[in-house]
Image: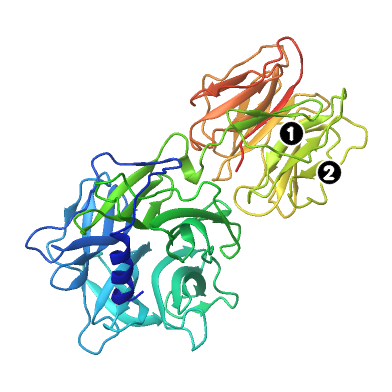
Amino acid sequence: MSVKFLRVFFLVLIILTASVSEAGWEKYKNNPVLTPTAGEWDSVGTWTISVIKDGETYKAWYGGRGAAEAIGYAASTNGISWSKHNVPVLPLGAGGEFDSGSIHSPCVIKDGSTYKMWYTGGDGGVNDRIGYATSNNGTAWAKLGVVLPLGNQGEWDENGVSTPCVIKDGATYKMWYTGVSAGGGDIGYATSPDGINWNKYAGNPVLEKSGSGWDANMVSWPCVIKDGGTYKMWYTGLGAGWAIGYATSSNGISWKMGKNNPVIERGAPGSWDNLTTFGPCVLKGSWKMWYTGRGPSGTLHIGYATLSGKGRGGYVYRGYYVLDAFGGIHLCDGAPAVKDYPYWEGQDIARDLEFSPDGTGFYVLDAYGGIHNCDGAPPLEDYPYWDDQDVARDLEFNPNGQGFYVLDCYGGIHPRGGAPELKNYPYWPDEDIARGLEIRNDGSFYILDCYGGIHPRNGAPEIENYPYWDGSAMARDLEIDPRLPETGYFVLDNWGGIHAVAAEPLKGYPFWEGQDLARAIAFPR
């Protein structure tokens, strides 16, 4: 977007009030972490950052403002304390070039041994475009010119394209970017075989401003990562002020906005970011965010945030559910209400509860293998069905794409809907022993047996200190803690007890002492 466009919004923001709502993200107490340096090229402002982790080093490229705009470079061992390169690494273009007036909002990936950057450039007029540059070391860059032009007259991005975010997904480069027209700004999508020649999606924009609320007037500055089979986007919305929201998608095109948006708002009155927060950059795995803020001085700085224990992996904790044997679903620790689920009064039929990967409703698995779609979830087809035989035990979605699995009581795992086959699972022929299946993002998995034993397969790390009821078939379900997706787990016993394994204990669960009633635990998405 153009410098003129940004300045208008910044002037508006100076008179706006501020509020705070973190929704799982915790701002670093000593923010900002990357600030202007007096007397240097970035003396007026530091903003719009792109961070990668290269080996043990965090590497950042950021917009700087001084006598002119440029893009700089900094390195860090922890993402907080940064050492700046002494000069800009990508300056303004020469007179007449598309980036002669402004240059900012870099997005950098390391593709093999080559660093690749897409960035916003403007010629001092009102129209921004997206340029491309490459480097062998991250500091000496060769510009290759405009790679994403303006839309045609009358199209949604006719007045500017800017703030690119690019990932490489297999052999395809995928870009999300801001498009501007007279009606404001929205987010579009494009693909490329080489990062240079781009095809804009015909159905653009893919994420639009809401027309009301916190993102009523504009959505922009997307940051997208692919986490297993889910695309996760953090983006900037403009309503009463600028704030940062969250959305998910199964294909990078159809997006579902988070229920707890915005996830990062302006700071408290008088703080460094009390006027605006925008331009997020999030790293997968460590779930660190860097973003731009502006406070009372009017100067732009870059801040830092991490997801708390109630929000790792892009997940915001909102309580959980326990399924009983009759199909009753018990809301725990503030979980939102659910509806339209099957209930078999007095009949021990319900076996598992799973929420749809895209957040649209949930599913209940019955003892015979029937899968009941509830609360708006789309139907699942071609599931295994054992008519009048109590065989089905667990339902699990493929975290790396389409399809799902059903675990039977003998340990057999049945892939459906295009899910790849899982191999090397434990199998107890004619013995009702298997109880739970949990699949990690890397494709490894665990099987829970009825005594509490947890069997790692396909490279899953060993889990220690889990509850074990030797000779007593009490274990009922195993769930990964979504707040700590790489380390934490819960084991549910048949009385309703929930045993935390390398995880913060849960509270508020139902407990039926001496009664075999609990069947599954589930977390809303």
Specify the quadrant of the image occupied by residue 450: top right
Given the image, on which type of amino acid does mark 2 rest? Pro
Disc 1, disc 2: CB below 8 Å?
A: no
Q: Secondary structure at mark 2?
A: loop
Rendered location of residue 403, percent (x, y):
70, 51
In this orientation, which residue lies closer to the viewer: 259 or 381? 259
Residue 84 located left or right of residue 327: left
Please tell me which of labels 1 and 2 falls first in the chain.
1
Q: Residue at x 22, y 60 (%)?
A: 46
Q: Secondary structure at mark 1?
A: strand
Numbered disc in front, either 1 or 2:
1
In this orientation, which residue lies closer to the viewer: 516 or 420? 516
Residue 37 vertical position relative to residue 354 in the rendered view, above or below: below
Label 1 to label 2: alpha-carbon separation: 15 Å
Residue 461 located left or right of residue 58: right
Q: Quadrant of the N terminus?
A: bottom left
For the residue carrying disc 1, how many other residues have a C-alpha within 10 Å: few (<14), some (14-19), or many (20+)?
many
**Of the numbered discs in the image, which one, if any, rests on residue 391?**
none
In this orientation, which residue lies closer to the viewer: 174 or 265? 265
Residue 49 vertical position relative to residue 520 in the rendered view, above or below: below
Q: Residue at x 74, y 50 (%)?
A: 376
Q: Quadrant of the C terminus?
A: top right
Q: Residue at x 27, y 80 (%)?
A: 99
Given the image, on which type of amino acid does mark 1 rest? Asp
Residue 438 vertical position relative to residue 115 in the rendered view, above or below: above
The residue labelled by disc 2 is 384
Rendered location of residue 225, percent (x, y):
47, 56
For the residue carrying disc 2, how many other residues have a C-alpha within 10 Å: few (<14), some (14-19), or many (20+)?
some
Q: How is the image coloured?
A: rainbow
The residue labelled by disc 1 is 352
Rendered location of residue 503, percent (x, y):
49, 26
The furthest residue to the left:
39
